[in-house]
Image (cartoon, rainbow, N blue to C red):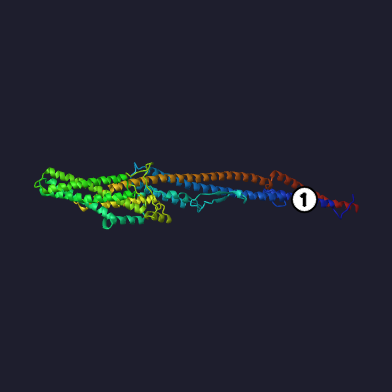
Amino acid sequence: MALIINTNLSSINGQRNLSSSATALTTSMTRLSSGVRVNNAKDDAAGLAIADRMNSQIRGMTVAVRNANDGISLTQTAEGALGSLTDTLQRMRDLAVQSSSNAAVSASDRAKMDTEFKALNQELMRVVQNSEFNGKKILNGDLALGLNIQVGATTDTNSRISVGVSNMSSLLAPVTKTTLSPASQTIDSSLSAAITKANNDAINDTASPYYQLLTPANQAAKLANAAVVAAKKAMDSPTDLALAKASSLANAKAAAALAASSAATKTTTAASLTNVLVSQEFTDKVNAADFATQATNTSVVATDLVVQAKSVTDAAQSSSLSITAASLADAAKANVAAAGQNIYVTVMNQLTGDKIDLPASTRDVTGQVDMTVAGQDTVLNQAVNRAIKTGNAFGSDREAQKTLAGLALAKAVAGASYVEDPLKTASANETDKASFVGNNSLVLSVSTAADNVAADYALASINYIDAAIAAIDTERSNLGSTQNRFTTTIANLQNGIENQTAAKSRIMDADFAVETANLSRAQILQQAGTAMLAQANQSGQTVMALLR
């Protein structure tokens, strides 16, 4: 081996190995101090790229878990609001079922129930309009097209779940149009004006056919009442000839007036029958009453001639006159009622175009009242069309407005038909008039029909409410399934986070067992390398021995 001093290969080799071990020592110390295996790209370039991609996935999935939990909160909020709607609808259904029974529910009871029914309807709309999640309306249709919740780390469509809630305002619209008490609703102004005019015509307009029919009937009733008063006086003084003659004359006047009015009522009823406004049964009753009235008139006139020629009287004569007066009063009441019913059906036909059947009218094979609707553009149809254009749900219901018009007209006709009792004060007559209207046969029959309509409305309300509850149940079912999707998604995301974190850890985290062994190795190599470099640097001293 040559002895040279210009190039110390052993030193160079020692320096190289010492540098390598120093680098290894630095790497081990860095990994042990940071706990990370890949501190720089030079440590593991491919591993760093893979780990960064995994880190994006892990962080994205972590945020997606939060999004999914927000989605669960959203669906739970919506479902809670829908549950509130269902509770409200169930109470409305209870009221509708109760209202559909005419046997136990009066019109007054139904009106009270309708007050709560309307309040619950308003509560439905309040919940729909005010239900929010983080400032977003959730039941008013804003979520009808779906709200996307990002539940994945990537941008593809499979990483989103859509939460949709139908427009509850539209879904509940049929319910909001329902009512339990048509009679408590507001009648269209045009119908009300037409009824008021007909009533005024019957009372004040001498040229009106209503006046010409009802006023003579009322006058005959007044004369019959006067005859009753005269008969009472005659009964109180049975031997007073003047009182007996006055009573007989009062009977004769009442009978004559009643006969004329009854004949007019008969003629009008025949015309109403021709126009299919009254039944044959009603016409037969009017004809029979007129036949009896005409016979009574003949008899009363003959009796009056006898009484007026008498020079003395007795209790038997007074009793006979009293019985006749009472009979005339009863017949006059029936005649006024028949005249009023003719006015009622005529006005209702003009308002509605319908062929109006009174109680005891002919019915079809199913037992239903036979009502046909004429095609003309009537006041009622115009009112309904206006209501439809303005979005008035109740007003656009033809049967409801017809019911209101019938009730208003029946009460107006009954009021116009009331004959004051001359023996009573004005205040007492007003009280009697209110009672008369309330217990009037026409008003009662129309009220009964209105009750039947109200029961039909209640039954219809039940159908609408059931449909709404079923639709809400569908919405809640959809929200429930969406909640389950979110729950499953969260579990899947958490599993992905766990496993990808483990994979990333294997790339990025330092194995302390390995790194401490590497550190020990590097430290020993450093010490050995330093010692050997020192020896290599001293190896040239051997040349000096040759130079001595």
Q: Residue 428: in sight, yes or no?
A: no
Q: Residue 542: in sight, yes or no?
A: yes
Of residues 74 and 532, the one drawn nearer to the viewer in this rendering? 74
The residue located at (62%, 45%) in the rendering is 496
Q: Quadrant of residue 211?
A: bottom left
Of residues 397 and 25, the one drawn nearer to the viewer in this rendering? 397
Residue 150 on image: x %, y %: 58, 50
- Few, some or many C-alpha atoms within 10 Å of disc 1 (few <14, some 14-19, many ≥20)? some
Q: Is residue 101 left or right of residue 332?
A: right
Residue 397 on image: x %, y %: 40, 51
Of residues 208 and 542, the one drawn nearer to the viewer in this rendering? 208
Q: Is residue 449 left or right of residue 519?
A: left
Residue positioned most to the left: 311
Q: How many marks?
A: 1
Q: Quadrant of residue 376?
A: bottom left
According to the image, label 1 marks what residue?
A: 20
Q: Secondary structure at mark 1?
A: helix
Residue 519 on image: x %, y %: 72, 46
Q: Is residue 233 left or right of residue 161?
A: left
Of residues 369 and 74, the one drawn nearer to the viewer in this rendering? 369
- Callout 1, which amino acid? Ser
Residue 176 on image: x %, y %: 42, 50
